[in-house]
Image: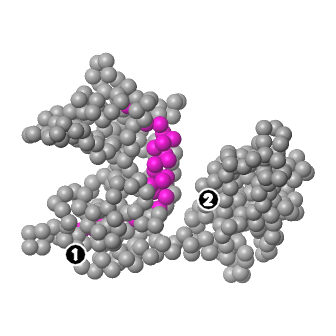
Amino acid sequence: MRPLNNFEEQNLKILTENSVSLTLIEPTENGLTKSIMDATGTVRNYLKTNSFHDYGLQLQGPENKIIIDAIIYGEYSIFKSKTSLYRPQTKKGDPRIWFSGLTKYSEPNDILALICFDEKIHILNLTKLSVEQLLKSTLINPLKELIQEINGVENAIANELLVMLRKIAGSPIPSMVNADTSVGRTLETALNIDINSSKLPDYKGIELKSFRAKKGNRKNLFAQVPNWKLSNFKSSSEILDAFGYWREEDFKLYCTVSGITVNSQGLSLKVDSDINQLVENSDQKGIGGFVVWTLDKLHERLLEKHKETFWVAADTITIDGKEHFQYKEVEHTKKPIASQFDILLEQGVITLDHLIKRNSKGRVVEKGPLFKIKPNSLNLLFPPSEKYLLL
């Protein structure tokens, strides 16, 4: 695809700011003439992720063609179209896509946005339509109605959760346990959310992260074990044996590892963009890089866990000698910028925590590795967020 011009970039920015998930495609002169376009990898992934179509499961030939309703948008009008999704018998069945009537709304090399919503594919010509002008218009128009409808669906669950949070914020809630993690466990219990180790978001697609407002601790992003197949060390037990220490009766490795400093265990992180990996290194002779994460996997976990997140701040209050939480504010983030993750690792803004311990039965328990971000740095990883007061 060709580079976007300033007008097209502005259109894309406004759609992103309005929580519109989309993909882009560029019809060529040959494609418009022959009524055919290549379904690029980006387009295929988008359709699959949104449960519209999986080319990987589609057989070749016209008899296996899939038709989906589509709408092409003009400034103040729409054209009802049909999307053809197919794999021809020739050329190894390379995935194809086409929209009926498209030649009336697109010139060669225009940039089209494809939006999967309400069981249809919506097509916007970002080269010709002014998204900003249509959204600001006092006149009702189809594009404005579409984005308002998408926003209504996108925000319905967030608004539901916000109402629930405001109800429990009316009074301090006693801490469930005496532990750093209690602020989160107490909140989830108050919201009747099951506490489990699932990697999925907590509430209908929204991840909940709570923290004590005055402690200024780093915020937990996600946990992810290394890729043991690519690593020299093959288990958390090996890491513990190499770098652990005795603390009273426990043999453990509780430490933070950064990309800009070497910690007291001699450990540090290095982002190797050439091979798309994050490597943890030891300064011990003969060890060097001992475990590896692929950056693709870390990006996947970030996007999976934080597609939409409520970061809930709580004040701590002691009542009758027991800690209570007064939940007071929410920062609402969406769609982290995965490429920023690598930069923040290199800059030490995102760090890794090992939480490995061998228990009395000799079993090694690993609660991480946890990837965490410095307090007040969410705006370096996420687009502009919204904040809500609960009280």
What's under tag 1, amino acid-wise?
Pro
Q: Residue furthest top?
A: 286
Asked if residue 240 is among those painted magenta in the image, a careful observer would answer no
Tell me which residue sits at (32%, 61%) in the image: 195
Quarter occupied by the C terminus: bottom left
Q: Does residue 356 appear in the picture of this structure?
A: yes
Report helix, strand or loop for mark 1: loop
Q: Which residue is mark 2?
A: 50
Report helix, strand or loop for mark 2: loop
> Vertically, is 56 above or below 262?
below
- Image quadrant where residue 278 sits: top left
Tell me which residue sits at (70%, 59%) in the image: 114
Q: Position of residue 51 (x, y in %)?
A: 62, 59
Asked if residue 307 is among those painted magenta in the image, a careful observer would answer yes
Q: Which residues are magenta?
A: 291-316
> Vertically, is 267 above or below 178?
above
Q: Residues within 10 Å of mark 2 (few under 14, many from 20)?
A: some
Q: Residues within 10 Å of mark 1 (few under 14, many from 20)?
A: some
Q: Position of residue 249 (x, y in %)?
A: 10, 39
What's under tag 2, amino acid-wise?
Asn
Q: Position of residue 187 (x, y in %)?
A: 29, 68
Q: Say which label, 1 or 2, has the lower sequence index.
A: 2
Q: Which residue is mark 1?
A: 172
Tell me which residue sits at (63%, 53%) in the image: 48
Left/right of residue 121 with respect to residue 356 in the rendered view: right
Quarter occupied by the N terminus: top right
Q: Position of residue 237 (x, y in %)?
A: 27, 33
